[in-house]
Amino acid sequence: MEIKRADFVISLPAYRDFPGIGLPQIAVVGKSNVGKSSLINCVTRRSKLARTSSTPGKTRLINIFLLNESFHLVDLPGYGFAKVDKQEKLRWGKMMQDYFTTSRELQHVFCLVDIRHEPTQDDIQMNQFLRQMNIPFTVIATKCDKISRGARQKQLAPICRALLVQPWQIICFSSEDSTGRDKVLETLESVLTVPEEDTGIQTEETEGSGSDPGGTISSDAE
């Protein structure tokens, strides 16, 4: 897959109907300042499509983008930023949980973690929530340009242990040199290419999983 067109659609303080809703959705989640906006800009080759900031806690809304006029990329607020009050964290957590439990169009989630650090408790909690909800996801280890190629496998080990995935299931990514961009695009294509005979089955499973959250999320903004 190649991204030929990418447009910003809307920012939402809470998930609801929006212009063009009904297309497949891919969500992007991760802790504050993990590089969600940078990944979106790199994948779309639009340097200013998603706003980036060096200040954690900047993204406090659900930002929705339309790619190739065929699917939506949903940038959810970051979590794990300490410098906000408890009520604000609860509000962001409810915002994300409401999205996951009500979106019928969600097909897949990109879970971003910083390759330089072990997953936080918030990362683990998000991982457990997605598993309980039976929502497919891919772990993307960002900022891999910050360490040597030889060190990457070593850094992936604690990520694999914490998030219960295998090293080959993780995409090492860098928005600085586009490492992993092709694999992200391949994943998008794979997720969005659904055989017609399977479409009805997957829709039923998605709707069924959305009826029972099976857990809760606490959140903060990127």
Image (cartoon, rainbow, N blue to C red):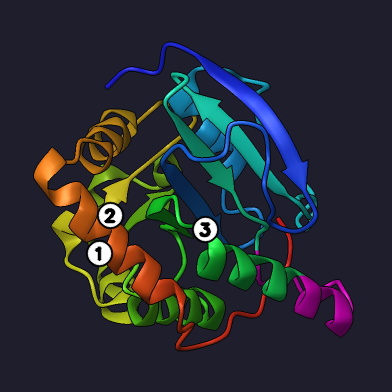
The magenta stretch spans which residues? 79-91
Q: Is residue 208 visible?
A: yes
Quadrant of the snapshot with the N terminus: top left
Q: Which residue is mark 2?
A: 151
Mark 1 belongs to which amino acid? Lys
* Number of the label disc, if any, that sits on residue 103: 3
Q: Residue at x 37, y 41 (%)?
A: 173
The picture quadrant where one finds residue 92 is: bottom right
Q: Is residue 52 visible?
A: no
Q: Is residue 27 left or right of residue 81?
A: left
Where 127 falls versus 11 (above or below)? below
Mark 2 belongs to which amino acid? Ala
Q: Calculate the distance from the C-alpha at mark 3 to the C-alpha at mark 1.
A: 36 Å
| Viewer-proximal residue among 47 and 70 | 70
| Viewer-proximal residue among 100 and 18 | 18
Of the two numbered discs 3 and 1 on the same chain, state the one appearing first in sequence: 3
Of the two numbered discs 2 and 3 on the same chain, state the one appearing first in sequence: 3
Magenta highlight on residue 100: no
Mark 3 belongs to which amino acid? Ser
Q: Is residue 57 left or right of residue 117?
A: right
x, y (%) of residue 214? 45, 88
Q: Which residue is mark 1?
A: 154
Q: Calculate the distance from the C-alpha at mark 2 to the C-alpha at mark 3.
A: 38 Å
Quadrant of the snapshot with the C terminus: bottom right
